[in-house]
Amino acid sequence: MAVVGEVSGIRIKITAKSEAFIKARITKGFSQRELARHSGFSHAYISLLERSIKNVGPSTAKKLSELLEKEVEELFEIQIA
């Protein structure tokens, strides 16, 4: 498991829920490139997130959730080990 963060010995892995993330982006009216431009992330990074290939950190998940006006838990799967 690729770990994106560790707090007090607790390891956290955060990945996008592909269908929910894509639906939220489209509902908001953003293409991948537009979301990338608004978020400051690259188009390639957004593409990797949508395919659940790339993990994200807590601050990235929060920023994208705010842009898409959804709760973090709606768009991302948070695994704690």
Image (cartoon, rainbow, N blue to C red):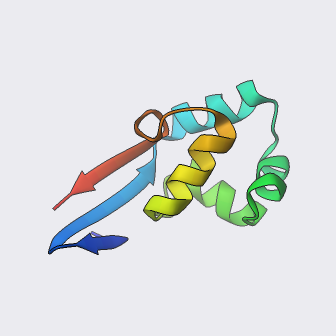
Q: Determine whether, in the image, residue 14 is placed left or right of residue 29.
A: left
Residue 34 position within the rendered picture, expressed as x and y whole percent measured from the top left: 85, 48
Residue 2 position within the rendered picture, expressed as x and y whole percent measured from the top left: 33, 72
Quarter of the rendering containing residue 69: top right
Residue 7 appears anywhere in the view: yes
For the C terminus, the quadrant is bottom left
19, above or below 79, in the image: above
Residue 51 appears anywhere in the view: no
Residue drawn at x 75%, y 29% is 28
Residue drawn at x 40%, y 38% is 73
- The number of numbered badges drawn on the structure is 0
Between residues 75 and 72, which one lies in front from this camera angle?
72
Residue 52 position within the rendered picture, expressed as x and y whole percent measured from the top left: 49, 53
Residue found farthest to the top: 27
Between residues 42 and 62, which one lies in front from this camera angle?
62
Residue 1 position within the rendered picture, expressed as x and y whole percent measured from the top left: 27, 69
Residue drawn at x 17%, y 73% is 8
Q: Determine whether, in the image, residue 57 is placed left or right of residue 41.
A: left
Q: Determine whether, in the image, residue 15 is placed left or right of residue 36.
A: left
Quarter of the rendering containing residue 60: bottom right
28, above or below 81, in the image: above
Quarter of the rendering containing residue 5: bottom left
53, above or below 8, in the image: above
Residue drawn at x 43%, y 53% is 15
